[in-house]
Structures are given as C-alpha cells and as structure tokens.
Amino acid sequence: MSRAWLLPEHIADILPAEAARVERVRRQLLDQAARRGFELIIPPLLEHLDSLLSGTGRELELQTYTLVDQLSGRLLGLRADTTPQAARIDAHLLNRDGVTRLCYCGPVLHTRPGGAGASREPLQFGAEIFGHAGLEAEMEVLDLALEAVAEAGVARPVVDLADARILRGVLAGVALDSVGLNDIVEALSRKDAAALDGLTDQLPDAARAGLRFLLDAYGGLGVLHQARAALPARTLIGHALDDLSRLASHLQRSHPGVQVGFDLADMGGYAYYSGVRFAMYAHGASQALARGGRYDEVGAVFGRNRPAVGFSLDVKTLAQRLASGVATGTVRAPWSESPEFAAAVRRLRDAGETVVIDLPGSPAEECGRTFDRALEQVAGRWVLRSL
C-alpha cells in the first residue's frame, strides 16, 4: 500500500477547527503588537546561509535546513528563527536613528523538534525593539508577551528570569575556547552536576564555585540575595542582579497574577543573548510558551551594533491552549440565482454572519458545519428561521 500521503515526523496538517483557533490567535497577536506601535515585517523564508546564521551560534545552525541555490551555487538556509532577519532589516533596510519596533508572524523550519511533541514547523510570532538600551524595553516586551498568553486563556503564567551577564561575569578572565564554553553552557542548561565538575576541574576555584552555585540557583526572589553573597563582586554580575530585581518588581506590580521565578543556569540561546533573558510557561507545564530577552550583539554582523530586545512564540502551540468555545452561528441557504437572494446573503455576510449555500445535489450539512438558522423565502421575502 502506498504511504505517499504520510507526512514527515513532527510535521502535521492543521484541520479546520484548529486552523480557526490558530488564525484567531495570530490576528490577536498582530493587533496587540500594532496597538503598541510595532510595525509588521514579512522577511523571506529563504536566505543566503551566511546572512541567516551570522552571529547566532551553533544552536541555531544545527536547527537550520540548508540547500544549494540553483541560480548562484551559494548555500541557502530555510530560516529557523526570524530574529536575525529582523536585525538585518533594522540595520540595512530601515537604518533609523531612533527606536524601531518590529513584529512578524510566519513559519520557521527546524531540523529537529524543540521538545516532546513539538512541531518542526512552528508558526513563529515575534516582536523586537531596536535602539533602546534601558530596561524599559525589556518591560515593554514582557508586557506584550504576557498579554499574548493571557489572550490564549493561560491563567497564572510563570515567568522565569535569567541573565547571560552572570555567566560572563563568573568566567571573566578565564581562558576558555568556544568548544569548552559551549560544553559548560550545555551542562548548566541540563543541570548536569557530574558533567560540569568534569569540565571545570582545571578552572580557578572562584570560577568553579560560581558555576556550581549557578547549577542550583533557581527559585524565588531569595535566589538573587543568595547570588549576591555567593558570586564574585563584579560590576557585570551586580548590574545583572539589579536588573533582574527591578524586572521582578515591575512584573509583580503590573501583573499581580504572574508567578515570577529565577533560573540563573538557564542558558538557552546563550550565544547571542547579551543580558536579561526570560521564559514564559503555563502553570505546571515544562515547555515554554514564549522566550526572549536582550541581544545587543545580533546586529553587529550587519554593520550596526545597537541595542535589541525581543521575544518569540509558536502560534500553533499557543492556540492549543485556547478553548474551542461555542461556535458562532452558521446560516444555511438554498441555491438561488435571484438578485433578491444575492442581496440578502450579502447583507448577512457584511454583518459578520457565515452563510453556507446548498449546491445542487450536495446538501450543506455534509460540509462539516452545524447550522443554527436557515435563510428561507417567505411571501416573496428572504428571512431567517431558527433551526
């Protein structure tokens, strides 16, 4: 038997009911961003590989599909993340001096799923603020991300905060090659104490102690107090802890239902994050709904190194959190070519109603919808009747 109709693993069709929820969330997200002044961009799915991966690190490189351009012979990549494209657009195409807010929503492709049950074809929504170095940019991005998950019905979301500067401060002055640093980052992210001990046995005692502390540095506000006592008294670390404390206070004031925590060993995307980073979860869930933070170096490879903060999420995953709710009413109508019928249908559709017309020999109920009203002709007039 032919299996040509089967899709690759972690790739799926989206059928009507779910597609409607996805589209509803997509429109809500874009509308929310637009109300805050974020301008929509639509970057291409395909780019030259060197442009797509510049400054992003090995993690994104491993997630990116590559192919050869039949026109130029150059390597092309199918984007696995839209943030580098937004940075390129900000640096080269817009090239503004002031603050620029950009948003986008489109598919990305991953060579491997990001987690259990994850799709290799997320529908990525993201929002980026370029040109503001202050913590206010992180606050605005976090506020937008929280609005996004709230619209999808996520009650009591959890926000985990971390900061890439803490690890850089701990390792300041320590000679490490890129492979050694990547191995340490991966061990911290996995919270693998045995691996971390083996990787750091030749490091100075202060660095080893700092890394070992980070491994267990997760929890509530007390984590920041412990970090100030346990980590080296370096300016970079102090600024990071101050910013994390200020962000936590902002979230607790502005979003009292949000649970704020800290995970100072969370190093996902460490290669391009330059400061605060965050992950957002539904209460009790292990897979993040949204991730983001500050990545001031992302535009450097495009010749314009300026402040940048943003976040992204998978619209499909967020839509799964959305209750299906009660379907809006659908009107069933008979086939007719009369001008009066066409005018009646037009009025209903202009008012936001869904009207499905019976095609001759194909009853409307076979289309998979449930009808609550019918359009019927009574005494020469087209009127609605409840079913």
Image (cartoon, rainbow, N blue to C red):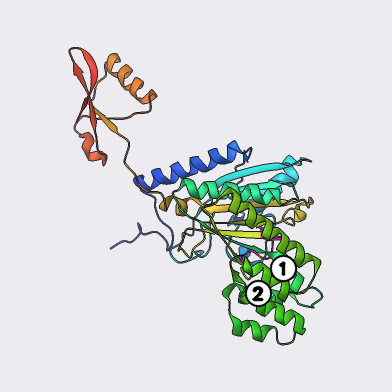
Q: Are marks 2 and 1 in contact (CB under 8 Å)?
A: yes
Magenta region, main secondary structure: loop
Residue position for label 1: 166
Query: Is 62 a magenta residue?
Result: no
**Image height check: is 319 above or below 27?**
below
Type of amino acid at the residue the image marks with label 2 = Leu
Q: Earlier in the sequence, mark 2 or mark 1?
A: 1
- Give the secondary structure at mark 1: helix
Taking the image as shown, residue 369 lies to the left or right of residue 315, namely left
Magenta residues? 268-276
Q: Residue 347: x, y in percent?
A: 35, 20
Quarter of the image where the N terminus is located:
bottom left
Of residues 335 and 174, which is closer to you in this image? 174
x, y (%) of residue 160? Answer: 58, 62
Q: Is residue 304 above or below residue 337?
A: below
Task: Decide if residue 90 is in sight here.
Answer: yes
Residue found 40% across the figure and 56% down from its top: 12
Q: Residue at x 65, y 73 (%)?
A: 185
Res. 75 in view: no
* Mark 1 residue type: Ile
Please tell me which residue lies in front, 285 or 16.
Answer: 285
Q: Residue drawn at (18%, 32%), measured in percent from left and top?
A: 361
Residue pointed to by mark 2: 214
Q: Residues within 10 Å of mark 2 (few under 14, many from 20)?
A: many
| Front residue of 66 and 273 | 273
